[in-house]
Image (cartoon, helix red, strand yellow):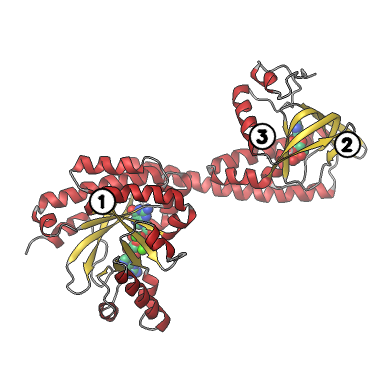
Amino acid sequence: MPTQNTDHTGLETWSAAPTTKGAHNARMSKPGQIVQSWIAMKALASYTLAFKTGDTIFNEGDPGCTAYIIERGKVEVSISRKGERLVLAQYDTGDLFGEMALIDDTPRSATITVLEPTEVIAIDRSLFEKAFDKAHPLVNLFMHTILYNLRKTNQLLLNKVVTPGYLLSQDKFNNKFLDARNETVYLVKAENELNRALRDDEFELYFQPIVKATTGRVEGFETLIRWFHPERGMVPPGEFITTAEQTGLIKEMGDWIIQEACRQLSRLSNEYPDLLKEQPDFFISINLSAKQFIFPDLFSVVTKSLDTHGLTPKNIKFEITESILMDSPETAMVILEKFKEQGFRIAIDDFGTGYSSLSYLHTFPIDTLKIDRSFVISMLENHTSLNIVNAIVSLANAIDLTIIAEGVETEEQLKALQDLNCDLVQGFYFHKPLPFTDVLELLKPK
Ligand code: C2E
Ligand code: CMP
Ligand code: CA
Ligand code: CA
């Protein structure tokens, strides 16, 4: 039988070496860690419930979206088939139960009966999902596997014919399990591939010129990553950036992109020492993914790269999307202010496709708006698109923001943008993204 704790918080029992409990006790080998999670969860849990001896907290097969931690008291976990009842475990102060239905959204795997007056604190699914969504997909797979095995073991223990209702819930569970497993297997393979590619130096930065609409002079470059896969050839970023974000690899990849962009800009200025003298506003523009933006050491990675290559912040521009500003404005503000103070420039990428809240244009320290390609493509056929481009350019000119139109492919589009007083343009009409050697060739003094 478990030792009843005497301390009303239950912490005494947890910090001591675990006492022997039944085979199904949820207690793990590191009680200190469990105490920490328990304290953290108690702080988050929203309400307490009280039960008296003999109460059923829930029945096997019930739907469930709440897990419970026992504040004080004792409960029994059991399953029954055809009148036969099997006790799986007894839980007391500090123990967690009801977590299985909450994790994988299946009916309760067992009945919980109260053995003595019991108080529990409730943890709702919403709370758990927030944490679970952020976890690596492997965590998801591991948990589903543990649940799957535990349910199977319960079945074996019971060794009885299962009811149709139970079979149904098992099918649902299996599908979910398979989905999670397939997704995870895909991501784990992709993560291994991307890791290998980073190690083997398979990534390269390409540079797409951004030119003055009226003269065609190159004013800067957007850096765009390319993956040269040994078998698949050149893989575009659309096929791996999301995976890098999902697996967290975007941090390492993003750091590499920053360092490489700085290295290449410094090569360029060494090769053509007059470039930055004649064009002090010349820039290299680096795309920052939302996931990369929130890493606390982003600023130090950037400043270290600048120091290493003897560059100044004014020649670096960062492209971020509107969602970065809207999802966590306070964090974004702190980070952007820091960059702005040092003299970096900030561009809003794909402008017009996201929230496009005008209020942030004067709240955040922004320098540049990049009009999304979709407007440029349709502006000649669709009057609304033309009006939108016109409005964005006028707005940007009125509040002194630089404007860049993306995806210019034809002379007519260029002409229309010139007529609207659009300052800078970028697109296949002028140049596709180029490898560094072509950049050197392009900027070679004539
Ligand atoms: P983006 O930041 O909007 O980049 C512009 C994309 O439009 C590039 O595609 C570029 O090649 C393409 N583009 C430019 N002009 C034209 C044009 O005239 N016509 C057409 N059809 N396309 C044009 P790319 O290189 O495939 O990149 C796609 C997206 O992948 C980027 O969209 C960006 O979101 C992401 N990405 C690319 N490189 C990086 C990177 O280094 N870091 C991060 N975080 N994301 C990147
Ligand atoms: P859930 O399926 O939500 O509801 C019943 C709970 O009983 C379950 O979550 C677990 O917390 C617990 N449970 C189920 N099977 C076992 C077992 N074999 N050993 C210990 N606890 C169990
Ligand atoms: Ca971009
Ligand atoms: Ca863009």
Give the x, y percent position of residue 322: 42, 60
Judge by depth and name the residue closer to the eye, 27 or 384: 384
Q: Residue at x 31, y 71 (%)?
A: 398
Residue at which label 1 appears: 343
Callout 1: helix, strand or loop? Answer: loop
Label of residue 358 in the image: none
User: What separation in Å lies between label 2 and label 3 (alpha carbons)?
Assistant: 23 Å
Residue at which label 2 appears: 55
- Disc 2 residue crowd, few under 14, some 14–19, many 20+, Cα 10 Å: some
Q: Amino acid at mark 3?
A: Lys
Callout 2: helix, strand or loop? Answer: loop
User: What separation in Å lies between label 1 and label 2 (alpha carbons)?
Assistant: 66 Å
Asked which quadrant contains residue 159, the reply is top right
Residue 364 appearing in the image: yes
How many numbered discs sit on the rendered protein?
3
Give the x, y percent position of residue 214: 19, 74
Callout 3: helix, strand or loop? Answer: helix
Label of residue 42 in the image: 3
Q: Residue at x 66, y 16 (%)?
A: 16
Q: Amino acid at mark 2?
A: Asp
Q: Residue at x 45, y 47 (%)?
A: 190
Q: Earlier in the sequence, mark 1 or mark 3?
A: 3
Tell me if the residue at label 2 has its CB under 8 Å from ligand 2. no
Query: Which quadrant of the render holds ligand 4?
Result: bottom left
Q: Earlier in the sequence, mark 1 or mark 2?
A: 2
Q: Amino acid at mark 1?
A: Gly
Q: Residue at x 42, y 66 (%)?
A: 358
Asked which quadrant contains residue 137, the reply is top right
262 vs 63, left or right, is left
Judge by depth and name the residue closer to the eye, 147 or 342: 342
